[in-house]
Image: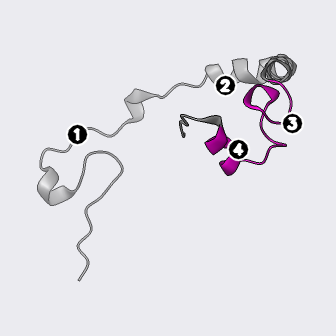
Amino acid sequence: MHFFSEDTIIKEKFPEDFLPVEFGGKGISLETLQEMMVSEYEQHVSFFEHLEKFKVDESRRPAKLENDEMLGFYGNFKKLNVD
């Protein structure tokens, strides 16, 4: 993410055709882009609702190791000694 203090810098970094009208470009206005995003979301709302049901099953997480230094790191990572 970049923040620009002047619109001239934005025009140097991005082609004018891609910039919205509000930023001095020839692209689609921000209001139209927002309407397109809302419309796209509404078309796929069931998919997003399905994604919200996914949760992490913490009961399947491995227990913390008693001796991390010798046996490796907590979780799925193991310590490797490479010569």
Q: Residue at x 86, y 30 (%)?
A: 28
- Label 1 crowd bin: few (<14), some (14–19), many (20+), radius 10 Å: few
Type of amino acid under label 3:
Lys
Q: Nearer the viewer, residue 4 or 8?
A: 8
For the N terminus, the quadrant is top right
User: Is there a contact, CB below 8 Å, between mark 4 and mark 2?
Assistant: no
Which residue is denoted by mark 1 in the rendering? Answer: 64
Magenta segment range? 8-29
Q: CA distance from mark 3 to mark 2?
A: 36 Å
The CA span between labels 3 and 4 is 11 Å
Residue 34, horizontal then vertical, whole percent: 79, 19
Residue matched to label 3: 26
Q: Nearer the viewer, mark 1 or mark 3?
A: 3
Q: Amino acid at mark 1?
A: Lys
Label 2 – label 1 distance at C-alpha:
29 Å
Question: SS for tag 3?
Answer: loop
Q: Residues within 10 Å of mark 2 (few under 14, many from 20)?
A: few
Which residue in the protein does label 2 denote? 51
For this view, does 33 lie left or right of residue 62? Answer: right
Which quadrant would the C terminus be assigned to in this image?
Answer: bottom left
> What is the secondary structure assignment of the residue under circle 2?
helix
> Farthest residue toward the bottom?
83
Mark earlier in primary sequence (4, 2): 4
Whether the magenta-drawn stretch holds residue 37 is answered as no
Mark 4 highlights which residue? 11
**Dot 2 or dot 1, earlier in sequence:** 2
Distance from the alpha carbon under mark 1 to that under mark 3? 56 Å
Total of numbered circles in the picture? 4
